[in-house]
Image (tube, rainbow, N blue to C red):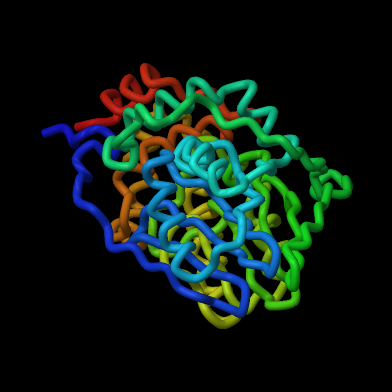
Amino acid sequence: MSKAFASQADLADKKITFEQLSPHCWAYTAEGDPNSGVIIGEKFIMVSDATATPAMARDLIARIRTVSDKPIKYVLLTHYHAVRVLGASAYFAEGATEIIASQGTLDLIVERGKEDMQSEMDRFPRLFRNAESVPGLTWPTMVIGGGDPTKGEVPGKLMVDLGGVKVQIWHPGPGHTRGDTIAWVEQEKVLFSGDLVEYEAGVYTGDAHLEEWPATLEALRALNAEALVPGRGEAMKGNAQVNKALDYTKRWVQTLFAAAKEAAAANMDLKAAMEHTRKSMDPVFGHVFIYEHCLPFDVSRAYDEARGIKNPRIWTAERDKEMWAALQD
């Protein structure tokens, strides 16, 4: 019997946690659903990842308002995926004047933002309840350079002063997408990684650069963070826990890509590559949230990259379903 497509059968609401990690930093997490981060200064607030819809964003805003009445001036898009960015318009009423993203993320919005929006709405019906509140694609107003450290380029960095706390925003290298951007509060050693890092949840790699991703994770490890808000999973507290999440993500990426390279070398078709990948992935990761959703997309991308397709192919709602049907028993 075929599995329900992507997360269409996942309709139960998740328990949301809003917790303080340091004097200025907060985590908004929800049992494996996409996380957001909040940095509250004496003058302004920054939100990292805007949620999937304005309706969802209003829940986060309500929690922020229990601890601060400062204007939410900045919204950071850690990457271009719809579940992270389409709620941005809700923050305009709260004082938001700057939507920040890397050049790589802007390029991806131009190239495939429309297709991604429809694709993700079909994949995640629960997250896109009240989708009619989404006014359209989210466009950054402030773009930072996206140099690739793996090519000897210096990443563009932006320093934002919220009053009493400064936030560094930069692109550490390709991984989950080619435009991933992080927020780093050095004085409090708190890292907001977006989907570059996950913990005990599926690591979606459908638009990833798998070969470069481990080096990007090591660049983040070098920060020696004491707290981490990952893209999915609980907030990590203490350097040992931060490293645990980095190790978890790195193991997923390397295990997946190794299996894909073996499949490509053996000239397997995609379905055989999926079966081969399950032998190494299922025993380690098969229990985690959103695993069965992620794996078909992950294997498709990993198999492409292993065969030399460097730039991820664009996912459309039609391609999603064709791939899903082809990989079902």
Residue at position x 30%, y 28% in the image: 324
Task: Please provide percent x and percent y for residue 280.
Answer: 38, 54
Task: Please provide percent x and percent y for residue 300.
Answer: 44, 32
Task: Please provide percent x and percent y for residue 88.
Answer: 53, 40
Residue at position x 23%, y 53% in the image: 13
Q: Is residue 266 shown to the viewer in this render?
A: yes
Task: Please provide percent x and percent y for residue 172.
Answer: 73, 53
Is residue 92 shown above or below 308?
below
Q: Quadrant of the C terminus?
A: top left
Q: Residue furthest top?
A: 318
Is residue 60 shown above or below 322?
below
Residue at position x 35%, y 27% in the image: 132
Q: Quadrant of the N terminus?
A: top left
285 or 93, which is in the foreground?
93
Residue at position x 67%, y 35% in the image: 140
Specify whether 39 is left or right of 317: right
176 or 50, which is in the foreground?
50
Q: Is residue 262 shown to the viewer in this render?
A: no
Specify whether 217 is left or right of 260: right
Quadrant for residue 129, please give it.
top left
